[in-house]
Image: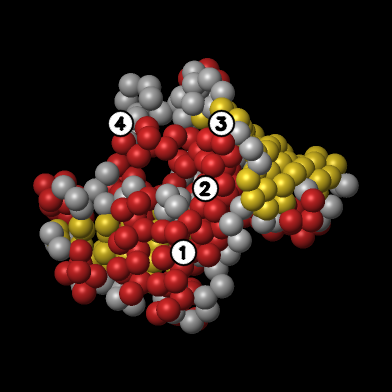
Protein backbone atom coordinates (compact mmCIF):
# COMPACT_ATOMS: atom_id res chain seq x y z
CA UNK A 1 0.00 0.00 0.00
CA UNK A 2 1.57 3.28 -1.16
CA UNK A 3 0.63 6.35 0.87
CA UNK A 4 -0.26 9.39 -1.27
CA UNK A 5 -0.32 12.98 -0.13
CA UNK A 6 -2.87 15.01 -2.09
CA UNK A 7 -1.81 18.56 -2.88
CA UNK A 8 -4.72 20.70 -4.05
CA UNK A 9 -8.32 21.35 -3.05
CA UNK A 10 -10.09 22.48 -6.23
CA UNK A 11 -12.63 20.65 -8.36
CA UNK A 12 -10.04 18.48 -10.12
CA UNK A 13 -8.33 17.59 -6.83
CA UNK A 14 -11.59 16.68 -5.13
CA UNK A 15 -13.51 15.01 -7.96
CA UNK A 16 -10.67 13.27 -9.81
CA UNK A 17 -7.50 12.89 -7.74
CA UNK A 18 -9.19 12.37 -4.41
CA UNK A 19 -11.81 10.02 -5.82
CA UNK A 20 -9.30 7.90 -7.76
CA UNK A 21 -6.89 7.59 -4.83
CA UNK A 22 -9.70 6.80 -2.40
CA UNK A 23 -11.00 4.01 -4.65
CA UNK A 24 -7.64 2.48 -5.60
CA UNK A 25 -6.82 -0.80 -3.81
CA UNK A 26 -3.07 -0.17 -3.89
CA UNK A 27 -3.16 3.44 -2.69
CA UNK A 28 -3.88 5.00 0.68
CA UNK A 29 -4.70 8.69 0.97
CA UNK A 30 -2.41 10.00 3.72
CA UNK A 31 -3.72 13.55 3.88
CA UNK A 32 -4.50 16.78 2.06
CA UNK A 33 -2.63 20.06 1.75
CA UNK A 34 -4.00 23.17 0.07
CA UNK A 35 -3.30 26.87 -0.18
CA UNK A 36 -6.68 27.50 1.51
CA UNK A 37 -6.63 25.67 4.89
CA UNK A 38 -10.44 25.69 5.12
CA UNK A 39 -10.82 23.92 1.78
CA UNK A 40 -8.08 21.49 2.74
CA UNK A 41 -9.88 20.67 5.99
CA UNK A 42 -13.19 20.18 4.17
CA UNK A 43 -11.71 17.88 1.52
CA UNK A 44 -9.71 15.93 4.09
CA UNK A 45 -12.82 15.48 6.21
CA UNK A 46 -14.72 14.20 3.15
CA UNK A 47 -12.18 11.42 2.70
CA UNK A 48 -11.60 10.82 6.41
CA UNK A 49 -7.91 11.79 6.40
CA UNK A 50 -5.87 14.53 8.10
CA UNK A 51 -5.52 18.04 6.70
CA UNK A 52 -2.00 19.47 6.69
CA UNK A 53 -0.99 23.11 6.88
CA UNK A 54 2.69 22.43 6.20
CA UNK A 55 4.00 20.97 2.92
CA UNK A 56 6.94 19.19 4.52
CA UNK A 57 4.74 17.60 7.18
CA UNK A 58 2.61 15.95 4.51
CA UNK A 59 5.72 14.90 2.61
CA UNK A 60 6.94 13.20 5.78
CA UNK A 61 3.63 11.32 6.03
CA UNK A 62 3.54 9.92 2.49
CA UNK A 63 5.45 7.82 -0.05
CA UNK A 64 4.17 9.63 -3.15
CA UNK A 65 2.42 12.87 -4.02
CA UNK A 66 -0.61 13.52 -6.21
CA UNK A 67 -0.62 17.15 -7.31
CA UNK A 68 -3.68 19.01 -8.61
CA UNK A 69 -2.50 22.62 -8.45
CA UNK A 70 -1.73 25.38 -10.98
CA UNK A 71 1.33 24.39 -13.02
CA UNK A 72 3.72 26.95 -11.49
CA UNK A 73 2.74 25.86 -7.97
CA UNK A 74 2.93 22.19 -9.01
CA UNK A 75 6.53 22.56 -10.20
CA UNK A 76 7.74 23.80 -6.82
CA UNK A 77 5.84 21.09 -4.92
CA UNK A 78 7.17 18.42 -7.29
CA UNK A 79 10.78 19.52 -6.79
CA UNK A 80 10.36 19.45 -3.00
CA UNK A 81 8.67 16.06 -3.14
CA UNK A 82 11.24 14.48 -5.46
CA UNK A 83 14.10 15.88 -3.40
CA UNK A 84 12.51 14.23 -0.36
CA UNK A 85 12.37 10.92 -2.25
CA UNK A 86 8.63 10.95 -2.87
CA UNK A 87 7.26 9.49 -6.11
CA UNK A 88 5.33 11.83 -8.40
CA UNK A 89 1.79 11.69 -9.79
CA UNK A 90 1.53 15.04 -11.55
CA UNK A 91 -0.89 16.87 -13.80
CA UNK A 92 -0.43 18.50 -17.16
CA UNK A 93 1.24 20.81 -17.94
CA UNK A 94 4.24 19.93 -15.83
CA UNK A 95 5.20 23.60 -15.47
CA UNK A 96 4.80 26.97 -17.18
CA UNK A 97 8.43 27.30 -18.30
CA UNK A 98 11.16 25.03 -19.58
CA UNK A 99 13.39 26.12 -16.70
CA UNK A 100 10.83 24.97 -14.11
CA UNK A 101 10.21 21.73 -16.00
CA UNK A 102 13.96 21.10 -16.02
CA UNK A 103 14.06 21.58 -12.25
CA UNK A 104 11.44 18.86 -11.81
CA UNK A 105 13.24 16.48 -14.17
CA UNK A 106 16.60 17.10 -12.48
CA UNK A 107 15.15 16.50 -9.00
CA UNK A 108 13.41 13.28 -10.07
CA UNK A 109 16.52 11.93 -11.76
CA UNK A 110 18.78 12.90 -8.85
CA UNK A 111 16.79 10.83 -6.36
CA UNK A 112 15.51 8.15 -8.74
CA UNK A 113 11.84 8.57 -7.91
CA UNK A 114 9.17 7.24 -10.26
CA UNK A 115 6.99 9.75 -12.07
CA UNK A 116 3.81 9.84 -14.13
CA UNK A 117 2.21 12.92 -15.68
CA UNK A 118 -1.55 12.63 -16.19
CA UNK A 119 -2.63 13.33 -19.77
CA UNK A 120 -6.15 11.90 -19.60
CA UNK A 121 -6.31 10.32 -23.05
CA UNK A 122 -3.05 8.47 -22.64
CA UNK A 123 -4.64 6.36 -19.89
CA UNK A 124 -7.87 5.51 -21.71
CA UNK A 125 -7.59 1.99 -23.15
CA UNK A 126 -8.98 2.67 -26.63
CA UNK A 127 -6.73 5.71 -27.16
CA UNK A 128 -3.64 4.03 -25.71
CA UNK A 129 -4.15 1.01 -27.96
CA UNK A 130 -4.75 3.19 -31.01
CA UNK A 131 -1.57 5.22 -30.44
CA UNK A 132 0.56 2.11 -29.97
CA UNK A 133 -0.70 0.42 -33.12
CA UNK A 134 -0.64 3.59 -35.22
CA UNK A 135 2.90 4.47 -34.18
CA UNK A 136 4.04 0.92 -34.97
CA UNK A 137 2.73 1.13 -38.54
CA UNK A 138 4.70 4.29 -39.36
CA UNK A 139 4.60 6.22 -42.62
CA UNK A 140 2.55 9.11 -41.25
CA UNK A 141 3.04 12.46 -42.99
CA UNK A 142 0.81 14.82 -41.06
CA UNK A 143 -1.91 15.15 -38.44
CA UNK A 144 -4.75 17.53 -37.64
CA UNK A 145 -5.72 18.13 -34.02
CA UNK A 146 -8.76 20.20 -33.01
CA UNK A 147 -9.73 20.73 -29.38
CA UNK A 148 -12.46 23.33 -28.82
CA UNK A 149 -13.68 23.67 -25.25
CA UNK A 150 -16.18 26.08 -23.72
CA UNK A 151 -15.33 26.51 -20.04
CA UNK A 152 -16.62 30.04 -19.52
CA UNK A 153 -20.29 29.06 -19.55
CA UNK A 154 -22.36 29.17 -16.32
CA UNK A 155 -21.79 26.16 -14.14
CA UNK A 156 -18.32 25.25 -15.42
CA UNK A 157 -16.00 24.34 -12.54
CA UNK A 158 -13.00 25.66 -14.50
CA UNK A 159 -14.26 29.02 -15.76
CA UNK A 160 -12.96 31.01 -12.79
CA UNK A 161 -9.53 29.34 -12.77
CA UNK A 162 -7.01 32.23 -12.75
CA UNK A 163 -4.21 30.32 -14.46
CA UNK A 164 -6.52 29.10 -17.24
CA UNK A 165 -7.79 32.62 -17.82
CA UNK A 166 -4.22 33.92 -17.97
CA UNK A 167 -2.59 31.19 -20.05
CA UNK A 168 -5.55 30.01 -22.09
CA UNK A 169 -6.09 26.97 -24.25
CA UNK A 170 -2.44 26.67 -25.30
CA UNK A 171 -1.36 25.65 -21.80
CA UNK A 172 -4.58 23.99 -20.58
CA UNK A 173 -5.69 21.73 -23.43
CA UNK A 174 -2.61 22.07 -25.63
CA UNK A 175 -0.86 19.39 -23.52
CA UNK A 176 -3.70 16.95 -24.19
CA UNK A 177 -3.42 17.51 -27.94
CA UNK A 178 0.36 17.17 -27.98
CA UNK A 179 0.22 14.01 -25.87
CA UNK A 180 -1.69 12.32 -28.70
CA UNK A 181 0.29 13.69 -31.64
CA UNK A 182 3.86 13.22 -30.37
CA UNK A 183 3.77 9.43 -29.87
CA UNK A 184 2.93 8.95 -33.55
CA UNK A 185 4.81 11.75 -35.35
CA UNK A 186 7.74 12.15 -32.97
CA UNK A 187 9.43 15.05 -31.21
CA UNK A 188 8.56 18.58 -32.32
CA UNK A 189 11.54 20.60 -33.59
CA UNK A 190 9.94 23.84 -34.84
CA UNK A 191 6.72 25.76 -34.10
CA UNK A 192 4.78 28.53 -35.78
CA UNK A 193 1.65 30.00 -34.19
CA UNK A 194 -1.22 32.34 -34.93
CA UNK A 195 -4.07 33.65 -32.79
CA UNK A 196 -7.74 33.75 -33.78
CA UNK A 197 -11.00 35.01 -32.28
CA UNK A 198 -12.41 33.80 -28.96
CA UNK A 199 -9.05 32.68 -27.60
CA UNK A 200 -8.21 30.50 -30.60
CA UNK A 201 -4.59 29.55 -31.14
CA UNK A 202 -3.37 27.64 -34.18
CA UNK A 203 -0.03 25.81 -34.21
CA UNK A 204 1.96 24.48 -37.16
CA UNK A 205 4.49 21.91 -35.96
CA UNK A 206 7.49 20.29 -37.64
CA UNK A 207 8.50 16.90 -36.24
CA UNK A 208 11.67 14.82 -36.33
CA UNK A 209 11.87 13.11 -39.71
CA UNK A 210 9.96 15.85 -41.53
CA UNK A 211 6.32 15.14 -40.65
CA UNK A 212 4.14 18.15 -39.90
CA UNK A 213 0.95 18.69 -37.92
CA UNK A 214 -1.59 21.39 -37.12
CA UNK A 215 -3.18 21.97 -33.72
CA UNK A 216 -6.15 24.31 -33.14
CA UNK A 217 -7.28 25.11 -29.60
CA UNK A 218 -9.67 27.27 -27.64
CA UNK A 219 -11.36 27.31 -24.24
CA UNK A 220 -14.02 29.81 -25.36
CA UNK A 221 -15.83 28.15 -28.24
CA UNK A 222 -19.57 28.72 -28.57
CA UNK A 223 -21.28 25.75 -26.89
CA UNK A 224 -22.55 24.62 -30.30
CA UNK A 225 -18.97 24.51 -31.63
CA UNK A 226 -17.40 22.37 -28.89
CA UNK A 227 -15.45 19.65 -30.68
CA UNK A 228 -12.57 17.21 -30.52
CA UNK A 229 -10.86 15.73 -33.57
CA UNK A 230 -7.47 14.03 -34.01
CA UNK A 231 -6.67 12.62 -37.44
CA UNK A 232 -3.47 11.16 -38.92
CA UNK A 233 -2.74 11.01 -42.66
CA UNK A 234 -0.05 8.90 -44.32
CA UNK A 235 0.99 6.04 -46.55
CA UNK A 236 -1.67 3.76 -45.10
CA UNK A 237 -4.54 6.21 -45.44
CA UNK A 238 -6.42 8.12 -42.76
CA UNK A 239 -6.82 7.15 -39.10
CA UNK A 240 -8.88 8.94 -36.46
CA UNK A 241 -8.15 8.76 -32.75
CA UNK A 242 -11.11 7.20 -30.88
CA UNK A 243 -13.09 9.31 -28.39
CA UNK A 244 -11.73 7.79 -25.18
CA UNK A 245 -13.36 5.17 -22.97
CA UNK A 246 -14.35 5.91 -19.39
CA UNK A 247 -14.25 9.02 -17.24
CA UNK A 248 -11.30 10.92 -15.78
CA UNK A 249 -11.42 9.04 -12.46
CA UNK A 250 -11.10 5.71 -14.25
CA UNK A 251 -8.24 7.04 -16.38
CA UNK A 252 -6.42 8.36 -13.32
CA UNK A 253 -6.83 4.95 -11.72
CA UNK A 254 -4.89 3.52 -14.68
CA UNK A 255 -2.20 6.16 -14.17
CA UNK A 256 -1.96 5.15 -10.51
CA UNK A 257 -1.66 1.50 -11.57
CA UNK A 258 1.23 2.37 -13.84
CA UNK A 259 3.01 4.52 -11.25
CA UNK A 260 2.74 1.70 -8.70
CA UNK A 261 4.21 -0.70 -11.28
CA UNK A 262 7.16 1.67 -11.76
CA UNK A 263 7.67 1.90 -8.00
CA UNK A 264 7.49 -1.88 -7.50
CA UNK A 265 9.70 -2.81 -10.46
CA UNK A 266 12.28 -0.09 -10.03
CA UNK A 267 12.01 0.89 -13.70
CA UNK A 268 12.05 4.56 -14.61
CA UNK A 269 11.03 4.54 -18.26
CA UNK A 270 7.34 5.42 -18.23
CA UNK A 271 6.23 6.89 -21.55
CA UNK A 272 4.53 9.83 -19.78
CA UNK A 273 7.08 10.54 -17.07
CA UNK A 274 8.41 13.98 -16.19
CA UNK A 275 10.78 13.86 -19.18
CA UNK A 276 7.83 13.61 -21.54
CA UNK A 277 6.08 16.31 -19.50
CA UNK A 278 9.12 18.51 -20.06
CA UNK A 279 9.05 17.76 -23.81
CA UNK A 280 5.46 19.01 -23.97
CA UNK A 281 6.32 22.16 -21.98
CA UNK A 282 9.16 22.92 -24.41
CA UNK A 283 6.71 22.88 -27.34
CA UNK A 284 4.24 25.10 -25.50
CA UNK A 285 6.95 27.58 -24.52
CA UNK A 286 8.20 27.75 -28.11
CA UNK A 287 4.63 28.31 -29.30
CA UNK A 288 4.22 31.15 -26.80
CA UNK A 289 7.33 32.83 -28.22
CA UNK A 290 6.16 32.22 -31.78
CA UNK A 291 2.82 33.92 -31.02
CA UNK A 292 4.50 36.92 -29.42
CA UNK A 293 7.17 37.44 -32.05
CA UNK A 294 5.38 36.34 -35.20
CA UNK A 295 8.08 33.92 -36.32
CA UNK A 296 8.89 30.24 -36.41
CA UNK A 297 10.71 29.11 -33.26
CA UNK A 298 12.98 26.14 -32.57
CA UNK A 299 11.94 23.90 -29.69
CA UNK A 300 14.44 23.62 -26.83
CA UNK A 301 16.01 20.17 -26.87
User: Mark 4 to mark 2: distance in Å?
Assistant: 23 Å
Residue 102, numbered circle: 1
Q: Quadrant of residue 244?
A: top right
User: Mark 2 to mark 3: distance in Å?
Assistant: 13 Å
Q: Few, some or many C-alpha atoms within 10 Å of disc 1 (few <14, some 14-19, many ≥20)? A: many
Q: Horizontal placement of 30 versus 205: left or right?
A: left
Q: Which residue is mark 2?
A: 285
- Asked if the residue under mark 1 is in contact with the one under mark 3, i.e. CB atoms within 8 Å, the reply is no
Mark found first going from the N terminus, 3 or 1: 1
Q: Few, some or many C-alpha atoms within 10 Å of disc 4 (few <14, some 14-19, many ≥20)? A: few
What is the basis of the colouring in this image? secondary structure
Q: Quadrant of residue 4?
A: bottom left
The residue mark sitting in front, 1 or 4, is 1
Label 3 sits on a secondary structure element that is strand
Q: Which residue is mark 4?
A: 160
Residue 183, numbered circle: none
The residue under the point 46% across, 24% down is: 220
Amino acid sequence: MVRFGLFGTGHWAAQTHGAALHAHPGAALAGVWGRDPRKAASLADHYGVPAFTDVDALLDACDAVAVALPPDVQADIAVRAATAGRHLLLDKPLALSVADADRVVDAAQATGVASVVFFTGRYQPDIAGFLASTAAVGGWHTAKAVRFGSIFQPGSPYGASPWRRTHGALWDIGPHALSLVLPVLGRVTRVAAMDGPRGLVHLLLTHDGGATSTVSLTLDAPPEAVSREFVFYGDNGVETVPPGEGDSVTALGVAIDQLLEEIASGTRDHRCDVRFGREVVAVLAAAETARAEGRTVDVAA
